[in-house]
Image (cartoon, rainbow, N blue to C red):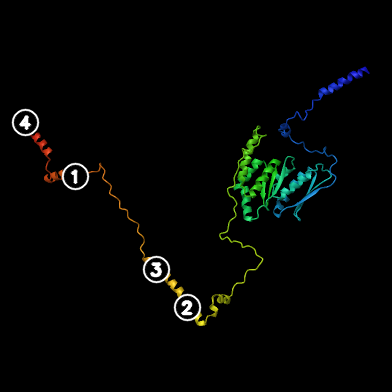
Amino acid sequence: MASSKQNGPTTASGKSELRSPKPTSENRDESELLTVPDGWKEPAFSKEDNPRGLLEESSFATLFPKYREAYLKECWPLVQKALNEHHINATLDLIEGSMTVCTTKKTFDPYIIIRARDLIKLLARSVSFEQAIRILQDDVACDIIKIGSLVRNKERFVKRRQRLIGPKGSTLKALELLTNCYIMVQGNTVSAIGPFSGLKEVRKVVLDTMKNIHPIYNIKTLMIKRELAKDSELRSQSWERFLPQFKHKNVNKRKEPKKKTVKKEYTPFPPPQPESQIDKELASGEYFLKASQKKRQKMEAIKAKQAEALSKRQEERNKAFIPPKEKPVHLKKPKEASTETKIDVAALKEKVKKAKNKKLGALTAEEVKLKMEADEKKKKKK
């Protein structure tokens, strides 16, 4: 008995040493609870998780357009092979133009039928098999956005849809790189395949584009968010101060008509009956006049009109003979000559006198003196 008592506490102490103390919720930080560790993945759903399988058979069917018939017929064996791995049966009905997927007795994953349904939906919306088969992965989802009913005008709808694609598909490619999603614009739908966070951004951009907001604004915001996400310090802070705030330049104003009609106040009583010609004549007194008097009045009214028209015509003719008003001419005062430009009149007169006295080709007085001195020097030398 003594030995058993002694062994008891030792085993308990050994177990307590092996077990590590469980961290309480108070000791954990909120940031650790909210953040997902890097490289963590949800464990795959295996047959061990659901060994008994499903109770009932589930099936989904979808129609496809005529132009997809040839492609689906070609790639259907690959679709069946991919779905058979998950124990899902797939049938293609070319007469009705439909695709059907249904579970079997061996199916153990209850959510795989939903992914198979999304697969045939994507194939019907012109998504290639290589991209559509990714939906069977656990970390990949899809979103089919209906844009046909967002814009009433057909021409406006086509322009906005083309704006989403961009020149040579550049806008769509930029959106795919920023969201890590595959995007396919076909007809009245936009199909997207990728992670859940990317699908949320794709839906927002597509709906904003159909509401006449250019996708370049959303792409710019996504680029800034991508750079901010790299900084570990900014993850827990608000990013509103970094994001651009775009203002609407085109304010929707209702066009006002040129001629505004003022609505009259509603009255339950009908409008008064208009006066007849006889009533007017009775009011003016013309009704009691004789025929000759009425005729004379008419002739006087006609002559008065003619005289008025003649006077107007004469005034228009006389306008051509009325001289236009001339602008008053302002005489400019002659400017006084500056001191630099003043001419010495006395010096000019003397020059003219000398020129008159001098014969053509004759030497000046100074030249004559110089010549005389030169001759005298020559004589002395001799």
Q: Taking 31 as reference, is 163 above or below it?
A: below
Q: For mark 1, give the secondary structure.
A: helix
- Residue mark closest to the camera, 4 vs 1: 1
Residue beneath the point at 10% across and 38% down: 368
Q: Which kind of residue does numbered mark 4 sit on?
A: Lys
Mark 1 or mark 3, which is nearer the start of the sequence? 3
> Where does the image place residue 217, in percent across and percent down from the top left?
61, 44
Q: Which residue is mark 3?
A: 317
Q: Which residue is mark 4?
A: 380
Which quadrant holds the N terminus?
Answer: top right
Mark 1 or mark 4, which is nearer the start of the sequence? 1
> Where does the image place residue 310, in percent across and percent down from the top left?
42, 72
Q: Residues within 10 Å of mark 1 (few under 14, many from 20)?
A: few
- Front residue of this view, candidates 43 and 246: 246
Q: Taking 125 as reference, is 13 above or below it?
A: above
Mark drawn on residue 345? 1
